[in-house]
Amino acid sequence: ERAGGLCLKWTCPGRRGVPDRMVLFPGGLLVFVELKRPGAKVKAQSLQDFWHDRLRQYDFIVRVISQPDEIAPFVEGCVRHSRALREQLKGVV
């Protein structure tokens, strides 16, 4: 919330493998985030891999974060993108 958005834990009953978090920013930016322990990756052909691909098919952004130093650049990029979206939508919505 300090960056102007919300980071919500996402659980989807009956749908194992969905990303851990939904991160919402002003302007309608929604990013799905998979949190992994340092150095860990999403295994190919896993349920997580399936859901990441499925969400990307709908043009959602899905990020895997496995290092603490990846968080700040990710949030900063989202904030910039969020501001650009709000500017584009002024007077439209």
Image (tube, helix red, strand yellow):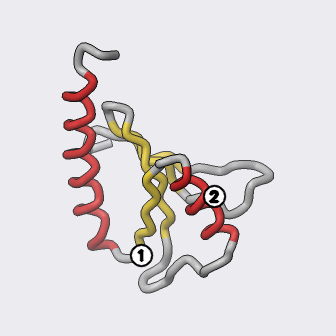
The quarter of the picture where residue 38 lies is bottom left
Q: Position of residue 36 (x, y in %)?
A: 49, 74
Q: Is residue 89 above or below residue 91?
A: below
**The residue tagged with tag 1: helix, strand or loop?**
loop
Q: Is residue 38 above or below residue 70?
A: below
Q: Is residue 34 left or right of residue 74?
A: right
- Please name the residue shown 28% across and 54% down the image: 75
- Please name the residue shown 23% across and 19% down the image: 90
Q: Residue furthest front?
A: 57
The disc placed on residue 18 is: 2
For disc 2, the neighbor class at 10 Å (few under 14, some 14 to 19, many from 20) is many
The amino acid on which the numbered mark 2 sits, given as a three-letter code, is Val
Image quarter of the N terminus: top left
- Please name the residue shown 67% across and 63% down the image: 17
The disc placed on residue 80 is: none
Q: CA distance from mark 2 to mark 1?
A: 16 Å
Q: Nearer the viewer, residue 85 or 71?
A: 85
Q: Earlier in the sequence, mark 2 or mark 1?
A: 2
